[in-house]
Amino acid sequence: MKKIATYTIQDWLFSIANGRFDIDLAESGIYPHRIEDLSFSENYDLNYSLDIGQEKLRQSIADMYQVDLAKVMITNGSQEALYLFYRSFLSPADHVITFTPGWQQSWEVPNHIGCEVSKIQLSRERDYQINLAQIIDALRPNTKLIILTSPNNPLGITCSAADLEALNALCCESGIFLLNDEEYLTDYTQSVAHYRGLTGAVSSLSKIYGYPGLRVGWFIGELSLIQDMVNYKRYTTVTNSSLCEFLAIEVLKNRAQYIADYQAMSAQGELLLNEFVSRWPECQMIPPQGTPFAYITLPKTWDSAHFCQQLLAQHHVLVMPAEVFEDKHAIRVSFGRPQSILRQGLEKLDEFIHFYREHHVD
């Protein structure tokens, strides 16, 4: 069996940059919470959890989405939810459509399974919105899955309601499954899980709640699919950490406050980033739509991978280069940070752009 491709996003974060940065403007969630931010309402036991997840936690999530409990599965982050879905749902005879810039897992795992994968490039000229005509052109008789990320990571844009409805209609007409990674959705009544036809949605506590270390995510979908995913999970992680699931229950008891804090910190951070970008006319920021990060395009003569490597080496500031999302000439900068940390990071980034602009050779 062929090796799966190197996961460039994680390689950048956990291998290349690990231990070399003082300020993290790369991680795409809100600034992480600490254990002291949580309280324990019960003396929880530390037995195994259930392979589908504890019922109390699943019920909390079912209530958020207003779906039946049977449609909810708990996973080790949304990354595992997606992986279990791909492995349970796809076969080598299938064709998959996904989008770039985007999340490498969405094309590499299906490709490793043996699927044909079509990657549709989202363009600056169309404000990075999906193009239904392009999707129709990419369809094949064996197209089984369309993978969407809305709100989008790394672009920060949200698929319009009209585009989503048109895409869903196309999928229903063709019998295609529509999967959406909804990590940055705060109103779960708007989830793709509520659309007709074959749909599924994933999210977690990592990004908007600020608990990536708990590794608690979930999948929303039909019972038969969840049963297949649970069976696959039994061969991998078996269950989530029961302790982390108990802590997740505590987090979701205060969901409204976490969402309010997330939105407040993101709004303040976006103002600072807007002010920063306005000083650099050669850098264009795509206005984020509900994400704690923004995608900033650089001049097309600038190598964004080299830019980020030099920024890390000279100023110990970490941002994400477009190359890890299969794009070029752009960076993703996270602004869901305390004001003092964000200001310091942007000051160093400002200083580095001065340097890079003066020493860069076209």
Image: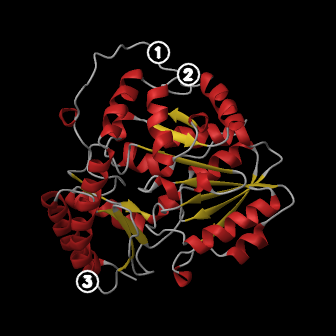
Location of residue 89 in the rendering, given as x and y in whole percent from the top left corner: 72, 41
- The reply to whether dot 1 and dot 2 touch (C-beta < 8 Å) is yes
Screen quadrant of the N terminus: top right
Identify the residue shown where x is 19% and y is 61%. Answer: 342
Position of 151 relative to 40 (above/below)? below
Callout 1 touching callout 3 (CB < 8 Å):
no
N-terminal of the pair, mark 1 or mark 3, is 1
Q: Is mark 1 on a helix, strand or loop?
A: loop
Residue that mark 3 sits on = 278
In the structure shown, which secondary structural element does the residue marked by tag 2 occupy? loop
Q: In the rendered structure, which amino acid carries the disc numbered 2?
A: Val
- Does 176 sit left or right of 27 as displayed? right
- Mark seen at residue 279: none
Say few, some or many: other residues with alpha carbon within 10 Å of mark 1 (under 14 / 14 to 19 / 20 or more): some
Q: Name the residue under label 2.
A: 238
Relative to 155, 131 lies left or right: right
Image quadrant where residue 148 sits: bottom right
Amino acid type for the residue under numbered disc 3: Ser
Please tell me whether residue 144 is drawn above or below residue 46 in the rendered image. Answer: below
The residue to which callout 1 is attached is 48
N-terminal of the two: label 1 or label 2? 1
How far separated are the C-alphas under marks 1 and 2? 9 Å
* Viewer-proximal residue among 51 and 187: 187
In the image, farthest residue toward the bottom: 281
Please name the amino acid that badge 1 sits on.
Tyr
Q: Nearer the viewer, mark 1 or mark 2?
A: 1
Q: Residue at x 22, y 76 (%)?
A: 276
* Foreground residue among 268 and 315: 268
* Quarter of the image where the C terminus is located: bottom left
CB within 8 Å, label 3 to label 2: no
